[in-house]
Every structure is written in C-alpha cells, then in structure tokens.
Image: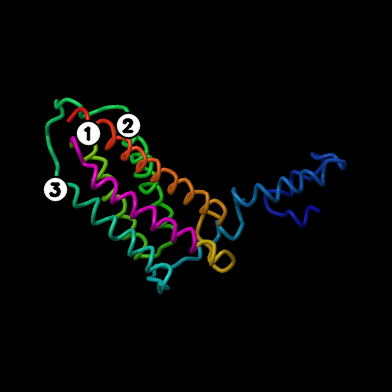
Amino acid sequence: MKEKLGGCGSKIWDGVVCKPFRPCFEKAWRFSKLFVPCRGDDYTLLAEDKKWRVDKLGPVSWAEIFCKGLGIGVGIASVSIYEQHLDRPYLFFGEKVAQMVFLGMVAVYYTLLNLQKIAEREIFNIGFNVLMIISHWCLFMILFTSVDPGAFVFCFCFLMTMGEMVHAMYLGVYWKTRREAWFPHPLLLLFSAFLILWYLVIISLQVVIYLTNYGEEL
C-alpha cells in the first residue's frame, strides 16, 4: 500500500491510519492528488526538465489565439476612450463596480499565471500572456475612468469567453498527452470554467447596465 502511494503519502501509512479506514482514505487521497500534486509528481518535476523553446501550434491552439488575439486588440483599443474626469455623475454604480471587481479578479489571475508560463519556458505563451495582462488592465482602467465603455466591455468579454471555451476544449482533447508545470489538468479545467463564468457575469452586468442605467440616467 505504501509503495503504491509513494512520495508524500508514504508517511501517512506508517501507523497513522487505522486499517478499517484505509480503503476510504485511499480513495480520498487519489482524488486529492488530481487537484494538489505532491512534490515529486510529474507535474512538479516537469518545470525542472523544461527548456526555453517555441512549441509548434495546432489548429485548436490557433483558434484560441485568434479569439483571444481579437480580444486583446479590443482591450488595448479601449484606451482610445480614456477620460480623466472622475467627478462625473453616474460614473460609479452597483453594476459597474461589480464589473470592475470581476474584471480585476481575471486580470490578477492572468498576472499570477505568468509565473507558471515562465516555469513552462515556452516563449510564445509568455509573450501572449503578457499581452493578455496588458489588455485586461487597460479595460479595467477604462471601466474606472470612462462613463460608457459598454461596447468595448461586451466585445472584449465575448471574445475572451470564446477563446477560453476553445482552451477548455484543447485541455479535453489533449488530456493524456499534454502536461503543464505545477497544475494538473482537472485544476486547469476548473480555472477555465471560472474564467468563462466570470466573463459571462461581466457580459450579463453590461446587458443590465444597458437596459437600466444608461437608458434612464445618461
């Protein structure tokens, strides 16, 4: 039993777990390893074996890059409506503040994700993720300073949602052949699911803003 678990599981079986509970504990242990890889697992060793490179991209990856690339263009182009007037009426209200919170969380996620991209040592992914970070923070700034960035918000989140759906499909197709540093596939799929949900929430809030605040107050 100890040999099967190995690594960081071996000490747990040295007199800590009673025999009647071992089957239940073993199932829970195997499930937890899907989401939190132990030191010495393939996921953590992968970062040590990586070399700086540029991987070849398949059609699924290019589809994701196309959708997110358009979104990056929309996010950066939103700077064109920058307004430095924070004292305007109706600049901040419930739905818009919620949009800023969700978009800020996504921007922070991509900022922290760049650490994993550096561990992967794939040059194109690092550069593309930097553009993702810039575009998200640009749109966040515009949400903070502009009265009506609605078209940019809607287009940006729609394109990013499409790109993230393609990314989730990519993870599903290459479930057994693709391994990334630090994070196992179930956790990466969970990240994608949260990103899609957050983008859809921002889009829904934009629809509410369009139907209520902009029509009545501006």
Give me the C-alpha separation between circle 2 and circle 3.
23 Å
Give me the C-alpha separation between circle 1 and circle 2.
11 Å
Give the labeled residue for mark 3. 80
Which span is picked out in magenta? 147-170
Give the labeled residue for mark 2. 95
User: At numbered mark 3, what does the secondary structure look like: helix, strand or loop?
Assistant: helix
N-terminal-most mark, 2 or 3: 3
Position in image of residue 202 (x %, y %): 35, 41
User: At numbered mark 1, what does the secondary structure look like: helix, strand or loop?
Assistant: helix
Give the labeled residue for mark 1. 214
Mark 2 nearby-residue class (10 Å; few <14, some 14–19, many ≥20)? some
Position in image of residue 23 (x %, y %): 82, 47
The amino acid on which the numbered mark 3 sits, given as a three-letter code, is Ser
Q: Which residue lies at the image location 87% right of the left edge and 41% below the top edge?
A: 20
User: At numbered mark 2, what does the secondary structure look like: helix, strand or loop?
Assistant: helix
Mark 1 nearby-residue class (10 Å; few <14, some 14–19, many ≥20)? some
The question of residue 154 being in magenta is answered with: yes
Mark 3 nearby-residue class (10 Å; few <14, some 14–19, many ≥20)? few
The amino acid on which the numbered mark 2 sits, given as a three-letter code, is Glu
In this view, the residue in front, 10 or 183, is: 183
Q: Which residue lies at the image location 14% right of the left edge and 27% below the top edge?
A: 88
Residue at the outermost right position: 20
On screen, residue 19 versus residue 104, left or right, reads right
Mark nearer the viewer, 1 or 3: 1
Q: Quadrant of residue 62?
A: bottom left
Q: Which residue lies at the image location 18% right of the left edge and 35% below the top edge?
A: 147
On screen, residue 149 versus residue 101, left or right, reads left
Q: Quadrant of residue 210?
A: top left
- Please, is residue 94 above or below residue 48 in the view? above
